[in-house]
Image: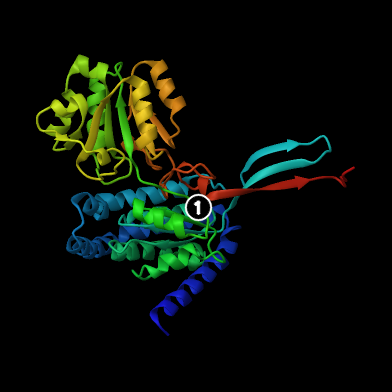
Amino acid sequence: MNEQTQIATMMTEIGAAARAAATVLATAPAASKEKALNAAADAVWDQRDVIIAANKQDMAFGADKGLSPSMMDRLMLNEDRIAGIVSGLRAIAGQDDPIGAVTEEWTQPTGLNIKRVRTPIGVIGVIYESRPNVTADAGALCLKSGNAVVLRGGSESFHSSQAIHACLVAGLKAAGLPEASIQLIPTRDRAAVSAMIQATDYIDVIVPRGGKGLVGLVQREARVPVFAHLEGICHIYVDASADLAKARAVLINAKTRRTGICGSAECLLVDQAFFDKHGDVLTRDLLDAGVEVRASGTLAETAGTVQAKPDDFGHEFLDMIIAAKTVDGINGAIAHIREFGSNHTDAIIAEDDSVADQFFRDLDSAILMRNASTQFADGGEFGMGAEIGIATGKLHARGPVGAVQLTSFKYLVTGDGTVRS
């Protein structure tokens, strides 16, 4: 049996097991899912030394591949980050169970009572790159929403993901739920990705979480429906009405807190009127923080900036680099974001309510913020416990994809011998 055939056989077995597990999870008691997630959290904390040792193998692999510092940061796990994983698992466990929730109910003149209730999607395939915490986040959210999940982590996080997955399986065992509820593909071979995105018999939806190359590949070749998590080309527009202290604090946090996440600011737009009043304080703050500022227009006059090239705008750097330019007020900012944005997250710093209202009304990004760092574009920060990704499309799920967003619905119709005339 050649390698391609082996992978095809393995993926069929994984898919069939996931489909069988999904039928059990669809009616699993909320208490069982909660118990599984809390037991998984216990296991992650108990096994933190094992997880960190596995992560060291992945960090060595990433260094050999020449990953950038920001990508190495995405990959790295330490005790604090593992504590964050544990906290996320417990937060998801403690959420209300979405399955069976009645989202709408009405009675027709015919006497029919109609309820729309949440139901699992079925089997979800998640394809992600270097962040090993996605293993826990995705596994937990899918379980909470009554879905089986097939996880395909990145080659860089191979060992870390396996160690975390083992803890999730321990949680399933403790709660008496099928081990196949959360499966991790045990190979780095990219042929597994191709098999997943073609597996219409077993997988109901694919969630790709990664760079533009991965998401583009999945969108082009998938036969399974896709929740797209596109690149985070996040803009911050500083309006003439902005409070200077707020602008300075938000901008530095949005760019430098963690540069390798999709909520990191990648472009600064400054109202020319703000610049005329306050000068180049924002670009100097960025430079002082060690950020490479690729500027155009008036902002390029600041010593230490780099002249921006056309393709610097609309680019996801995921590094200590930001594109920057002045614009002619709110209309100039909106025009720029419409041309270069990715519909992920965009923020305005403004005290003028009418300007902020126009920003919120005229832009159609999945997340729009006012006077807040784009680094808050995260399911955990939205109270979802965690997220699988930030969906930038408009169908089914949009913005942070948590447990509720991983459900569908069905209609329950009750009559009393009711017939149609």
Viewer can see residue 361: yes
Front-most of 64 and 122? 64
Q: Residue at x 48, y 55 (%)?
A: 142
Question: Which residue occupies the extreme front position in the image?
Answer: 310
Q: Give the image's coloring scheme.
A: rainbow
Question: Which residue occupies the extreme left position in the image?
Answer: 303
Q: Residue at x 9, y 29 (%)?
A: 303
67 left or right of 207 in image: left
Query: Could you tell me which quadrant the N terminus lies in?
Result: bottom left
SS at circle 1: helix
Front-most of 300 and 199? 300
Front-most of 385 and 15? 15
Would you name the residue on which mark 1 appears? Answer: 144
Query: Could you tell me which quadrant the C terminus lies in?
Result: top right
Question: Which residue occupies the extreme bottom position in the image?
Answer: 1
Dot 1 amino acid type: Lys
What is the count of numbered marks? 1
Viewer can see residue 136: no
392 left or right of 273 in image: right
Mark 1, other Cα within 10 Å: few <14 / some 14–19 / many ≥20: many
Find residue 72 and report its horizontal and vertical position in percent.
Answer: 22, 54
Rendered view: 415 above or below 26: above
Find residue 242 and report its horizontal and vertical position in percent.
Answer: 29, 19
